[in-house]
Image (cartoon, rainbow, N blue to C red):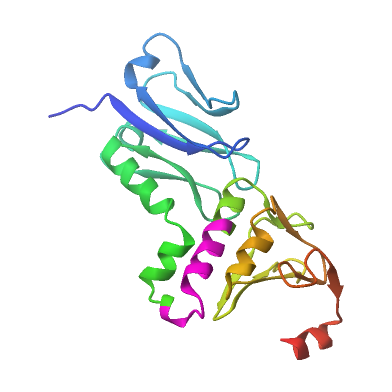
């Protein structure tokens, strides 16, 4: 029987957005019942506590909702062969993983796939008028999301994306705000590459990189349906 005493933890920092990797040894709990893990920016990522090295209480800061989530795990769940996801209950997405180094690394690679890579895998590239520009825009949006700079003024950071041949439309399902980014010309890239954050506004349509760049256009719901 092989007893695994080391595990790998990967978790995205809720403050700076970096994906941090840490090693955790079972022997770290031989004398003290708590182990705190910190990001390079100083933010505490996670705390693991145990009194008997059999049951462990895990608390981790969530990069998605900003809250602290809690898990109660046994030894085999933390020092197992598989990658255990650290999920956000509100969003349903993983902020990190615990498990063997190989499995955690593999899970993180899948998690870090860009929207552009996913679009290619799903065969959407042929649908775009300018695939190169569209893939650049998708990766740009992913970068903003990782930094916490993509969302809606109502507080929702989980926008819905709709990919169309010439543009990406962003929707906030909480307040029905809309953002439109055109992606059919290299001029579109030059218009948005200097924008450091994108936040939609309630009941408004924002033509983010059109000639009306930076202006918000208010429309009634009936006008919006006709416009689409």
The residue closer to the viewer here, 87 or 118, is 118
Q: Position of residue 35 (x, y in %)?
A: 47, 19
Q: Position of residue 150 (x, y in %)?
A: 66, 55
Residue 202 quadrant: bottom right
Dominant secondary structure, magenta:
helix
Quadrant where the image shows the N terminus: top left
Is residue 131 shown in magenta? yes
Q: Is residue 35 left or right of residue 27?
A: right
Magenta residue span? 126-140
Q: Position of residue 158 (x, y in %)?
A: 63, 59
Quadrant where the image shows the C terminus: bottom right
Extreme left residue here?
1
Extreme top residue here?
31
Q: Position of residue 157 (x, y in %)?
A: 67, 55
Residue for point 77% across, 72% down: 211
Is residue 195 shown in magenta? no
* Above or below for 146 versus 164: above
């Amino acid at each position: 029987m092989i007893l695994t005493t080391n595990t790998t933890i990967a978790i995205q920092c809720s403050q700076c957005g970096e994906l941090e990797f840490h090693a955790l040894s079972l022997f770290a709990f031989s004398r003290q019942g708590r182990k705190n893990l910190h990001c390079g920016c100083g933010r505490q990522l996670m705390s693991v506590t145990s009194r008997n090295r059999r049951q462990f209480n895990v608390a981790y800061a969530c990069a998605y909702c900003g809250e602290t989530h809690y898990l109660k795990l046994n030894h085999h769940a933390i020092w197992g062969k598989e990658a255990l996801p650290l999920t956000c209950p509100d969003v349903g997405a993983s902020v990190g993983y615990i498990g063997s180094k190989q499995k955690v690394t593999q899970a993180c690679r899948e998690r870090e796939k860009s929207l552009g890579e996913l679009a290619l895998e799903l065969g959407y590239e042929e649908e775009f008028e300018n695939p190169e520009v569209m893939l650049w825009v998708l990766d740009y949006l992913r970068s903003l999301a990782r930094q916490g700079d993509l969302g809606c003024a109502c507080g929702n950071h989980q926008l819905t994306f709709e990919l169309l041949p010439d543009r990406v439309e962003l929707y906030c399902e909480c307040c029905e705000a809309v953002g439109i980014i055109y992606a059919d010309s290299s001029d579109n890239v030059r218009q948005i590459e200097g924008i450091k954050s994108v936040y939609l506004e309630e009941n408004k349509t924002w033509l983010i990189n059109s000639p009306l760049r930076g202006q918000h256009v208010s429309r009634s719901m009936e006008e919006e349906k006709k416009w689409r």
